[in-house]
């Protein structure tokens, strides 16, 4: 029975993430020995709101991070699996990144579709929040830089899944022209998100959503801001709650702040200060449409979902 370490890499539109973990023999896959983690804002998809082409700077930054991640994985003798999401799905010049990335990692970056991305997000949340997932109608929301994945599950069974071509970077680049952003710009973002959610209205209307669990940088940043964390602590952020009044207050704070002021907000990575406002508006529209009173934050996104899947296969757990 193999217990070799597994390294999963998520090459996103805004962030490139690493998890290196080792399965524990005769233990649930979620009970992993975490050996290393990494999260770097590389902006591979900068410009995704335009023609979708990857820029040379974003490619160079992301490749440099992959060099670091590959070295970390080798230190732990880990098997590497890497996936790419919306920026690479959309980019007409994706090969300019994918070829050099494979050379650095020794394996290809698998560009996955939105359904696969949503499934991995749900897998991560299901392992992290088993009680909530089993108990009611749970909406899982993964806000990325270029897309947002929605998964609605009823007592653990997925009933609705959708990938929306809307994310914090894409919305910021499409609508924000002023610093601070104007009320009209914020309204335009909320309107386009609301229209995109129209097809999900029937799913939401089928019954009350008992919990909304948010994954990825927008949600974890808002949680860290609300908690006023001077140093990001995933153990504190994971599972924390953002009620709607707190979310409204954070959005008002962001809306009234310049870029320079946002970069000084406690709990917010300065490198995320430009796009966090658009991401927060996106989250609020979804939360209001779902009719929930709060958002639970999850620090464990698709790299964890991919790890859980691979670990289950390696341990012969028989899980899909």
Image (spheres, helix red, strand yellow):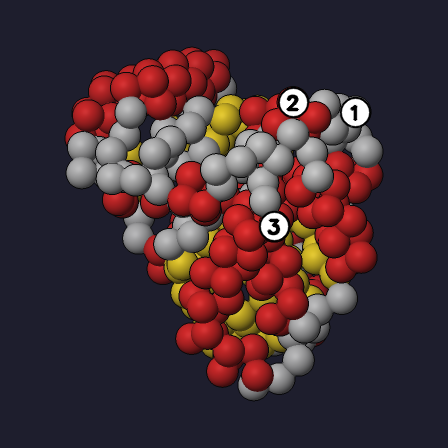
Query: How packed is label 1: few (under 14 Cα within 10 Å), some, or many (20 or more)?
Result: few
Please, is residue 211 above or below residue 8 in the view?
below
Circles 2 and 1, Cβ within 8 Å, touching? The answer is no
Is tag 2's residue or tag 3's residue first in the polypeptide sequence?
A: 3
Mark found first going from the N terminus, 3 or 1: 3
Image quadrant of residue 161? bottom left
Separation of residues labelled 2 and 1 (CA atoms): 17 Å
Residue positioned 50% across, 66% down in the render: 194
Q: Position of residue 231 (x, y in %)?
A: 75, 24
Element marked by disc 1: loop
Query: In the image, is 260 to the left or to the right of 229?
Result: left
Residue 261 image offset from top left, x and y in percent: 70, 26
Q: Is residue 55 above or below residue 147?
A: above
Q: Is residue 217 left or right of residue 227?
A: left
The image quadrant where one finds the C terminus is bottom left
Q: Is residue 93 left or right of residue 67?
A: left
Q: Which residue in the protein does label 1 denote?
A: 230
Q: Percent x, y for residue 264?
A: 72, 23
Q: Secondary structure at mark 3?
A: helix
In the figure, residue 104 lies in which quadrant?
top left
Circle nearer the viewer, 3 or 1: 3
Q: Where residue 101 appears, x then y in whole percent?
A: 27, 23
Q: Residue at x 58, y 32 (%)?
A: 179
- Residue at the spot 81% in from the left edge and 39% down from the top edge: 227
Residue indicated by mark 3: 183
Q: In which image quadrant can residue 100 be found?
A: top left
Dot label at residue 260: 2
Task: Describe residue 261's horizontal placement relative to residue 35 as left or right.
Answer: right
Of the residues tagged 2 and 1, which is closer to the observer? 2
Instruction: Estimate the spatial distance between the alpha carbons at disc 2 and disc 3, rounded to whole Å.
Output: 19 Å
């Amino acid at each position: 029975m193999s217990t070799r370490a597994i390294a999963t890499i998520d090459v996103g539109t805004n962030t490139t993430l690493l998890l290196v973990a080792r399965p524990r023999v005769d233990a649930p896959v979620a009970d992993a020995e975490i050996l290393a983690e990494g999260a770097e804002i590389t902006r591979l998809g900068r410009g995704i709101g335009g023609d979708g082409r990857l820029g040379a700077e974003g490619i160079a930054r992301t490749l440099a991070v992959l060099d670091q991640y590959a070295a970390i994985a080798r230190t732990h003798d880990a098997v590497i699996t890497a996936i790419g999401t919306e920026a690479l799905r959309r980019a007409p010049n994706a090969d300019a990144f994918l070829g050099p990335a494979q050379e650095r990692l020794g394996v290809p970056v698998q560009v996955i579709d939105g359904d696969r991305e949503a499934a991995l997000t749900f897998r991560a949340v299901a392992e992290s929040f088993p009680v909530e997932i089993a108990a009611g109608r749970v909406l899982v929301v993964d806000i990325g830089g270029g897309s947002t994945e929605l998964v609605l599950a009823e007592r653990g069974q997925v009933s609705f899944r959708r990938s929306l071509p809307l994310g914090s970077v894409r919305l910021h680049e499409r609508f924000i022209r002023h610093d601070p952003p104007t009320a009209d710009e914020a309204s335009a973002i909320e309107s386009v998100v609301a229209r995109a959610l129209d097809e999900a209205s029937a799913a939401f209307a089928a019954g009350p959503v008992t919990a909304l669990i948010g994954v990825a940088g927008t949600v974890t940043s808002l949680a860290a801001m609300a908690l006023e964390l001077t140093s990001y602590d995933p153990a504190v952020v994971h599972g924390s709650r953002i009620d709607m009044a707190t979310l409204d207050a954070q959005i008002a704070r962001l809306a009234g702040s310049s870029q320079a002021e946002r970069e000084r907000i406690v709990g917010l990575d300065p490198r995320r200060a430009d796009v966090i406002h658009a991401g927060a508006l996106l989250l609020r529209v979804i939360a209001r449409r779902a009719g929930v009173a709060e958002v639970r934050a999850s620090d464990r996104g698709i790299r964890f979902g991919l790890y859980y899947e691979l670990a289950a296969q390696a341990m012969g757990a028989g899980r899909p």
